[in-house]
Amino acid sequence: MTYKTNRKLKRLGDKEFVEDIKHYIKSSHHFYEVRIPELKVLAKRLYEEYNLKEFYKIFNRLWKSGYHEEKALALYTLQLYKEDYDLFTWKFIKSQLNEMKSFDQIDWVAINIVGEILIKYPSVEKEILKYLEGKNIWLKKMAISSTIPLIRGGEFKLALKIAELKIDSKNEHIQKAVGFILNEISKKDKEVAKDFILRHSHMPNITFNIATEELKDLRKIRGIKKLKADKFARFIFWR
């Protein structure tokens, strides 16, 4: 069976939409040339037709298809159920994390799904911190980015704890992720961000540049400190 995108998109308002999705899920074909706005329209319709428990099964079918667009549809739809998330949702999405193979996908899931679960269930924090200890760079980045919804809600404790643990990372992706959460903190509370940045002025350049996008005045201080550190490097080393 060949499933044509144009036909399906034209029938979004039809009562037969649910049957179209069912046929689609059984099909081995993917969304050819479907753009993100169109996927989000489909996600909204799936959300309207199924409760969260029912959608888990659909998610699995979409996810196992192997196609980027189908996986994106699964994630876009799951995000819409955030008011219904419970600890089973965490268990469910956790089982899919190892299959995510792009940093943009990991960040999206971290912020829009895992981060929302963290807000509702602080007990998940222990598991998030464990990801930082592993070797999987994707999951480390997920753990860092998952703090963004908390930050946007004015809660910085977990983000600062993670930033403290990973401020000296040698991995560029982790350096960027730490910079981004510090940047998010600076948007909510400049003083908290300044205090952390000044106490960790040795942080990698990538981290510092991202963290100070809203705090340009700190960039001059960084330059002065770096100059002094270079000048007196031998003294600092032996002390």
Image (spheres, rainbow, N blue to C red):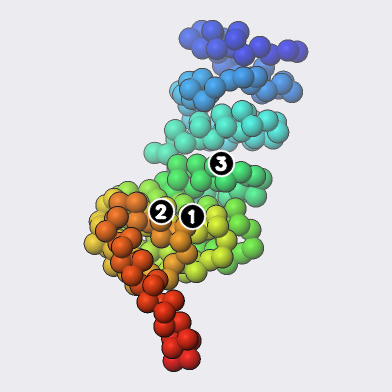
* Residue linked to disc 2: 210
Tags 2 and 1 touching, CB below 8 Å? yes
| Label 3, label 1: how far apart the Cα atoms are | 16 Å
Question: Label 1: how many residues lie within 10 Å, few (<14), some (14-19) or many (20+)?
Answer: many
Q: Pick whichever, 231 or 9, lies toward us.
A: 231
Question: Helix, strand or loop at disc 3?
Answer: helix
Give the image location of residue 176, x and y in percent. Answer: 48, 54
Which comes sooner in the sequence, label 2 or label 1? 1
N-term mark: 3 or 1 = 3
Amino acid on which disc 1 is placed = Lys
Label 3 amino acid?
Answer: Gln
Residue at 50% from the left image edge and 59% from the top image edge: 175
Q: Residue at x 44, y 33 (%)?
A: 80
Sequence-wise, the earlier of marks 3 and 2 is 3
Residue 105, disc: 3
Numbered circle sitting on residue 176? 1
Query: Dot 2: few (<14), some (14–19), or many (≥20) neighbours within 10 Å?
Result: many
Query: Residue at the location (33% across, 70% down)?
Result: 224
Q: Position of residue 126 (x, y in %)?
A: 48, 64
Front-most of residues 221 and 22 = 221
Amino acid type at circle 2 is: Ile
Q: CA distance from mark 2 to mark 1?
A: 7 Å
